[in-house]
Image (cartoon, rainbow, N blue to C red):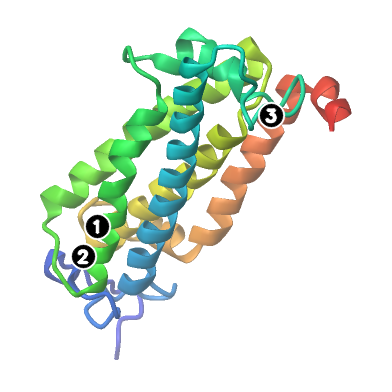
Amino acid sequence: MTDTGATTTSSDSSLDSSPDGENDVAVTGPTPLGGRAMALLLVVLGAVGFAASFALAWEKYLKLLDPDRTASCSINLFVDCGAAMSSWQGALLGFPNPYLGVAAFPVVITTGVVLLVGARLPRWYWMSLLVGTVLGQALVFFLMYTSFHVIVALCPYCMVVWTIMWPLLWYQLVRGVQSGDLPVGAGLRNVMVGNRHIILIIGYVAAVAWLMLSVGGDLVASF
């Protein structure tokens, strides 16, 4: 009799081994995250993040050339990237935060392209990428808190980066537990893999709720 509770995990068959999903880890019950899907996610999310980071970096450059210039992403009192760019939180490491995205997101894009052409990526690479993404998400949480509670203004380009960072982190976690790179119990693995899209949506709902509760009526009225 077949044991329907069995779950096969092997680092040799992780998602980085085959973009078409032929060598994906077999997860009993939930449909696994395919290798090609993961690769496309990295390419698309990385490209969107890079475009938004570059746009904000360019606005910062133009602002340095002309301090009196109003940024194209400054729409009203609450939707204003100028407030974020001029704050100390906008340059935590001594240079504008968007430069981090301009440097980091090409790595994400390249990783996706490498997977699409069928290359294998070692566990250490996936873990390094995940650590970098966790640090990026931590920075995003800090900047969200600053925007909601200190500056009380939203930067459109920043919000684009915030939006793509959550799925970038979440699907890497899903890939990690599915492949066995992140060892967890079979129950948790099946929950994460099988409910990956629902959990992603819950994360977005929580972020929007945080925004509405923090900024409240003033932000709603501005729209």
Q: Is residue 43 above or below residue 26?
A: above
Nearer mark to the viewer, of 3 and 2 = 2
Residue 129 marker: none
Residue 15, visible in the rendered structure: no
Residue for point 38% across, 51% down: 46
Q: Which residue is mark 3?
A: 211
For label 3, the SS is: helix
Q: Which corner quadrant holds the N terminus?
A: bottom left
* Badge 1 density bin: few <14, some 14–19, many ≥20, Cα 10 Å: many
Residue 114 marker: 2
Q: Is residue 42 above or below residue 73?
A: below
Q: Is residue 49 left or right of residue 206?
A: left
Nearer mark to the viewer, of 3 and 1 = 1
Q: Which residue is mark 1?
A: 111
Question: Residue 150's spot in the image, x, y percent?
Answer: 62, 10
Question: Residue 31's spot in the image, x, y percent?
Answer: 43, 75
Q: Are marks 3 and 2 in contact (CB under 8 Å)?
A: no
